[in-house]
């Protein structure tokens, strides 16, 4: 990484890492609109909606899809 000097074996990992420096957050929660720079963070976040829905007697569910990435 040209910003923090961190190195990666795979170029795709560097591309994902650069989101930290750019501030880009391409993954959006379809329920509440919060955005994340890693899909894993969005998936972890979506669990809170599922748990809240189940506690309220609903079925939870829903799917996770990344927002379109602007280039």
Image (cartoon, rainbow, N blue to C red):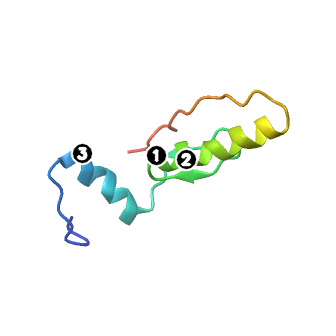
Looking at the image, residue 21 sits to the left or right of residue 12; the answer is right
Residue 27 pos. (x, y %): 51, 44
Q: Quadrant of residue 61?
A: top right
User: Who's the residue at 71% across and 41% down the image?
Assistant: 51
Mark 2 nearby-residue class (10 Å; few <14, some 14–19, many ≥20): few
Q: State the CA–CA distance, disc 3 to disc 2.
A: 21 Å
| 3 vs 2, front mark | 2
Mark sitting on residue 40: 1
The residue at the point 37 percent across, 65 percent down is 21
Along the line of sight, the residue nearer the viewer: 44 or 39: 44
> Mark 1 packing: few (<14 Cα in 10 Å), some, or many (20+)?
few
Task: Check whether the beta carbons of the residues at disc 1 and disc 2 lie within 8 A of each other.
Answer: yes
Query: Residue 41, image x and y in percent?
Result: 50, 50
> Is any atom of residue 13 visible in this view?
yes
- Residue 31 visible in the snapshot: no
- Residue sitting at x 52%, y 52%: 36
**For residue 66, above or below residue 44:** above
Mark 3 or mark 1: name the one nearer the start of the chain.
3
- State the SS at label 1: helix
Mark on residue 4? none
Q: Which mark is residue 44?
A: 2
> What residue did someone put label 3 on?
12
Quadrant in which the N terminus appears:
bottom left
Q: Is residue 33 above or below residue 6?
A: above
Give me the C-alpha separation between circle 1 and circle 2. Answer: 6 Å
Badge 2 marks a residue whose secondary structure is: helix
Q: Quadrant of residue 52?
A: top right
Instruction: Kindly report which numbered mark, 3 or 1, lies closer to the viewer in this rendering.
Output: 1
Percent x, y for residue 49?
A: 70, 42
20 displayed left or right of 68? left
């Amino acid at each position: 990484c040209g910003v923090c000097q961190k190195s990666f074996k795979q170029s795709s990992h560097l591309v994902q890492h650069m989101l930290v420096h750019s501030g880009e957050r391409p993954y959006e929660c379809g329920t509440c609109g919060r955005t994340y720079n890693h899909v894993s963070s969005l998936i972890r976040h979506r669990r809170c909606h599922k748990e809240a829905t189940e506690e309220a007697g609903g079925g939870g569910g829903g799917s996770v899809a990344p927002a379109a990435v602007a280039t």
